[in-house]
Amino acid sequence: MITLKTVVLPAPLGPISAKIWPAPTIGSRARPSALTPCIHFLPTLGFQKRLELARGLALEPRLLLLDEPAGGLNPTETQSLMELIRRLRDEAKLTILLVEHNMELVMGLSDRVAVLHYGKKLAEGTPGEVGRDPAVIEAYLGGDE
């Protein structure tokens, strides 16, 4: 007889509940899972991003490098990710180097921003300063023509 077990896996960013089927034995009945033990859940992209973040935090770094952490996320997931990164920065006292195209996320998290345009630094400063910089506006928002 095959039994279905529900387990809770500890995780640094909250527990994960999953259903696990045991590996089949000789004479076991067919079931919809693969031939090896499996965790039966389909993680969302937002969950996968948080898992990647947890992997990066596993060695307790002082500097965390994040390359487009919001890539592919919807606005709700992006907001949740921004709150999580902000909490990590503030509570764990992490320095975070963020490379990201989502300007709402960048401006909402950053103390300082550097803008690159075709590999050259276009502007650097506080989010407010950079957001008002004429060169940044010209390059990314289009200038008066």
Image (cartoon, rainbow, N blue to C red):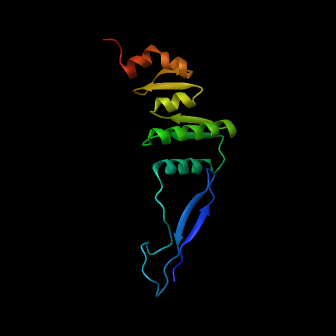
Give the vertical position of 135 relative to 100 (above or below). above
Is residue 89 shown left or right of residue 42?
Answer: right
| Farthest top residue in view | 145
Pinpoint residue 63: horizontal percent, then vertical percent: 62, 39
Q: Looking at the image, can residue 109 be seen? A: yes
Give the vertical position of 80 relative to 125 (above or below). below
Pinpoint residue 62: horizontal percent, then vertical percent: 66, 40
| Farthest bottom residue in view | 27
Identify the residue at horizontal 36%, vertical 15% (top origin).
Answer: 143
The quadrant where residue 94 appears: top right
Q: Nearer the viewer, residue 4 or 130?
A: 4
Q: Nearer the viewer, residue 20 or 97?
A: 20
| Farthest left residue in view | 145
Give the vertical position of 62 relative to 111 (above or below). below
Identify the residue at horizontal 46%, vertical 58% (top origin).
Answer: 42
Identify the residue at horizontal 62%, vertical 47% (top origin).
Answer: 57
Pinpoint residue 118: horizontal percent, then vertical percent: 39, 27
Is residue 90 shown left or right of residue 104?
Answer: right
Q: Looking at the image, can residue 68 be seen? A: no
Identify the residue at horizontal 46%, vertical 52% (top origin).
Answer: 44
Q: Nearer the viewer, residue 116 or 90?
A: 90
